[in-house]
Amino acid sequence: MKMKTNDRLIIFDTTLRDGEQSPGASLNGGEKLEIAFQLSRLGVDVIEAGFPIASPGDFEAVNQIAKKVRGPEICGLARCTKGDIDAAWKAVEPSKKPRIHVFIATSDIHLEKKLQMSQSQVLERISQMVSYAKKYCDNIDFSPEDAVRSDFQFLSKAIQTAIEAGATTINVPDTVGYAMPFEFGPMIKRLMMGIPGSEKAIFSVHCHNDLGLAVANSLSAVQNGARQVECTINGIGERAGNASMEEIVMSIKTRKDLFDVRTNIHTAEFYRASRLVSRLTGMQVQPNKAIVGANAFSHESGIHQDGVIKFRQTYEIMTPQSVGVPSSSLVLGKLSGRNALAKRLKDLGHVLAGKKLDAVFSKFKVLADKKKYVFDEDILTLVEEGEEGRQENFKLEFMQINSGTGIVPTATVRVSVKGKSFQEAAVGDGPVDAVYKAIDKITRIPVKLVDYKLSAVSGGKDAQGEVTVQVEMGTGQTARGKGASTDIIEASAKAYISALNRIRGGKIIKAPKTLAGERV
């Protein structure tokens, strides 16, 4: 026979059946219906809503989806038994486009160890049960379970038997994720070319990800003539999961030069679908997951950020908006460059260049070495610190703290006074108090701490702490200072010194020669 040239690829979603079989991913009827509505918005062609014979709850969920969801075909799974097929039909019957999916294993290991049936018995069962399902519904999908590990001649005979009994779709599963792309695609082509009457059915594939090749195997099959793929949102499913729908569809869309097929999928709904499935199943999407992962459109390397800023296509082969992600993200961290920081500052309302940008960038690099991600709030704090530090007679150079349960807190502090370094040590009621007393020894400015506030600049365990203090002199003059650091004691010291720099416009009350500390 000649292979078909049909250019439409049918997307068969099994998130609600095989996807729900992921350990811990059980869904109730309401949750399955909510996902089904989203799958309809996404534009999938077929929703395998569940395995109706499995439980009364699953039957009811499939039945409700068949009644309420319009657009896609609604499919129910059944083993090759009359009871399963009866339940599947009753569940999907309300749909305007019902489908029954029947399956039976064909590999020697399954026949011997699980079914305890001979090949002839399996062929007879296929003929009987596909014919039985056909009495209910014209749209019959047949799967020879564990097809990849089946004897090829017997597999071909099983598929031919199903087509002769009335199957309109033949789904070839790589049930245990055993196949390699370079063998799976040609296998599909060989089946289509060699089985009499194969042109009467659409050939489909269902690939598992045990070796991480589910998507690659599915795409290989499409290249070799398959015109339906069974897949799931986020690639969830038994064991290591199924082929990921978003990866298959976007591969085909992005590489039109290689795939002469089209889908009806509204790809801008992918991100919404991914988040919904993740939330309802409790299965988090890994950050580096293709298409919908948190890092899929994020750039941290300075070289990459610079390229994306100049021309997006340098490092992005698809737009984030094409899959429903609002925008790309330049993740600022220790690998980021000046251009990325300048762009983020501009987005935040601060246009800096030259020495001002260099000063903030220098502080940014120091901070980025201390914490994994630098958030917008962190950047704004760096800018504010720069604005406050225009007159810095005092500058923190070094501090060391010794504190703990049953230990008297002590602090050794080194402060630069107009470019000259002075160092002192002190004890206190706590580490911050000890630091402040050591600073007082160096500066000799008679101030009283009247207010101290600590808050987190951003989220996460490595968040910067921001300290705001207010000091008061005997004359009644007050000054506020602010400091930020991933170390809250360092932030406290910066805030205190910032306030001292503001006393009388930054003028030092005592001359350096009267300072008690020893020059370093």
Image (spheres, rainbow, N blue to C red):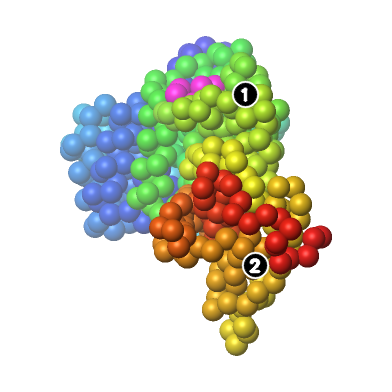
What kind of residue is marked 1? Ala
Q: In terms of image quadrants, where is residue 520?
A: bottom right
- Provide the secondary structure element on which disc 2 rests: helix
The relative height of residue 425 versus residue 226 in the rendered view (above or below) is below
**Could you tell me the amino acid type at mark 2?**
Lys
Q: SS class of the residue under badge 1?
A: loop
Q: Report the residue at 71% width, 47% height from top.
A: 418
The segment highlighted magenta reads: 317-323
- In the displayed image of the protein, which residue is found farthest to the right? 520
Res 246 seen here: yes
Residue 179 image position (x, y, % from top left): 66, 40
Q: Position of residue 301 (x, y in %)?
A: 68, 34
193 above or below 271? above
Q: Residue at x 26, y 26 (%)?
A: 71
Name the residue carrying label 2: 441
- Hey, which quadrant is residue 514 in on the image? bottom right
| Residue under numbered circle 1 | 353
Give 271 or 213, whichever is nearer the viewer.
271
- Mark closest to the chain's N terminus, 2 or 1: 1
